[in-house]
Image: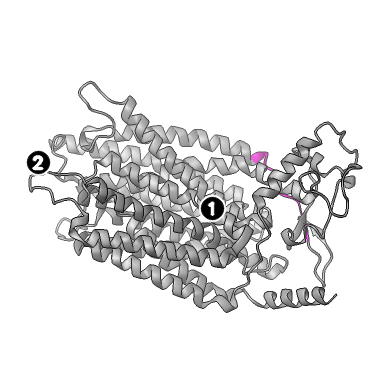
Amino acid sequence: MEEKKESHAIAREEKRKGGLKTMPFIFANEVAEKLAVVGFSTNMLSYLTQQLHMPLAKAANTLTNFNGTASLTPLLGAFLADSYIGRFWTITGASIFYQIGMTILTLSASIRPFRPPPCTPNGSDCKEAFPWQLAILYTSLFVNALGAGGYRPCIVAFGAEQFDENDPKEKTKTWSFFNWYYFCMGVSMLLAVTAVVYVQDNVGWGWGLGIPTVAMAVSVAAFVLGYPMYRQLEPSGSPFTRLVQVVVAAIKKRNIPMVSDPKNLYENDEMDEKISIYGKLVHTNQLSFFDRAAIITESDNYSAPNPWRLSTVHRVEELKSVIRMGPIWAAGILVITASAQQGTFYLQQARTMDRHLSPHSTFQIPPGSMTVFTYLSMVLAISFYDRLLVPFARRFTGLDRGLTFLQRMGIGFGITTLAIMTAAIVEARRKHVAAQAGLLDSPSVTVPMSVFWLVPQYALHGIAEAFTSIGHLEFMYDQAPESMRSTSTALFWMSISAGSYVSTMLVSLVHKYSAGPNGSNWLPNNLNKGKLENFYWLITLLEGLNLMYYLVCAKYYTYKPLEIRKRDDEPKNSV
């Protein structure tokens, strides 16, 4: 009895924590972290090709492979957070890994022997980095990827859980949190691709990477400072183990006749208490094979069941929810494949074009800073969505968030297709201008075409991200079982990983199958003699097919049924 009173006292104390007062600490951490990560990743292609003298295709693949790996490691971080150490300590530890990786990268860029000798003025003698120099680079990138593994799946879920889902007033703030999280992220990215990239291109890479490294240290301090105010949910054991237990129990009982009434399936609220704080999942008729895991037999111990033989309805529905999310999750992969071109081939296009602000200006926009138009359009689109579109849509849908996350994602998918289509048209125009100027064999000479021709494709990607990425993140957070919030966010990042790897695979396949007898291909170092527009049209085709696939999946998707936990002042209800 005393333990129960103590448990309730702790719960009341946790309820007083969290809320809006914690947001400055979380957002400050996110701003500084993104300034660090984007500050080095946005312009990394330039560092690899100009400082380490990598061929363009190898540099592009190195960058996309790093992004892919950094989006794959969150599964490990999510497992640790959900199962053992909680989100706060996972984020703190991951930030330290980030700090180590950034420090190694800064030192390698600052100390001359860590890079190959400069190229000769005419470029005839340009040696690629030695294997040991590349090993230092890859080590720093790997450590940064480990840091991403702990940070990325936890920071969003940690921020969202500062609002009580059982409190109607606070629940509406959860959806605004996702918008403002991305807004703050966009502002920090804007700063990274302008000020930081300018320092890298015009002052030096030592300073250009040192600034993000200091920002990373500031982010750790800002986050830890808010520790006493955070609402923290205790880890509830391995979610992967529970999913496997359901599968094993269902297979063991595959020959047992199904019960006629789902109410006879096993339920144990005490057993599920830690994994259903905000609500209990109720039975659905889909994927009925797994319901066998909840059938009670004579050999089952009803009061203390063996989870490898008997699972509760809630645990069975956890597995069903994850499976139902799969097709929607997969649709986000190719969207990332299209977006990945901003850090590789879009950047190379910008490098070949006239980057002066005006005909009489001496200032040139760094190629890596072109993504400022992506982030600026994303920030503006988020503001428009949150302040204008949501109140307008709410009149017709009756939803607090205006549009469902599936509707929001669908709009983003369509805009992504339009963005890559625009990129193909602009590239065809750029090559035409280069040919008219007689520059097909002169890749180092600027094409007399303003870099501002690239603004529409960058801006469309930013608008698409405001719809697709936030909608996808909302979907993964809301539809996942509450005990798997970090894991579901990790799956969001895993889709980014898969999209990056698909981009790498497409580049490799195009290199292989577009190769001509004279060594030419669609994606040579000299873009003026390539067929980059064909590569963009290929991605446009894939995006169109992916949009149709998504619309079918969204039409038949079933939202998870949740019975909200009873509060003192209101009855239970299901959503």
Q: Nearer the viewer, mark 2 or mark 1?
A: 1
Could you tell whether 224 is left or right of 535 in the image?
right
Q: Residue at x 31, y 30 (%)?
A: 511
Nearer to us in this view, 334 or 556: 334
Tell me if 365 is positioned left or right of 2 in this view: left
Mark 2 highlights which residue? 124
Q: Residue 159 placed where, x, y %?
A: 57, 66
The amino acid type, in three-letter code, at marker 1 is: Leu
Q: Which residue is tagged 1? A: 76
Q: CA distance from mark 2 to mark 1?
A: 45 Å
Q: Nearer the viewer, residue 220 or 453?
A: 220
Quadrant of the image occupied by residue 427: top left
Labels 2 and 1: the sequence-earlier one: 1
The residue at the point 67 percent across, 57 percent down is 237
- Place residue 4 in its image quadrant: bottom right
Q: Is the residue marked by circle 1 packed among few (<14), some (14-19), or many (20+) residues within 10 Å?
A: some
Q: Residue furthest top?
A: 517
- The foreground one among 35 and 316 is 316
Tell me the quarter of the image containing the N terminus: bottom right
Q: Is residue 463 visible?
A: yes
Q: Position of residue 322 (x, y in %)?
A: 66, 46
Most frequent secondary structure within the magenta stretch: loop
Q: Residue at x 73, y 66 (%)?
A: 166
Q: Residue at x 47, y 37 (%)?
A: 543
Task: Mark 2: give few (<14), some (14-19) or many (20+) Cα within 10 Å.
Answer: few
Residue 233, magenta (yes or no): no
> Magenta residues?
555-564
Identified by mark 2, the residue type is: Ser
Residue 493 position (above or below residue 99): above
Check disc 2 and report its element: helix, strand or loop.
loop
x, y percent for residue 392: 59, 59
For the question of whether residue 187 can be seen, the reply is: no
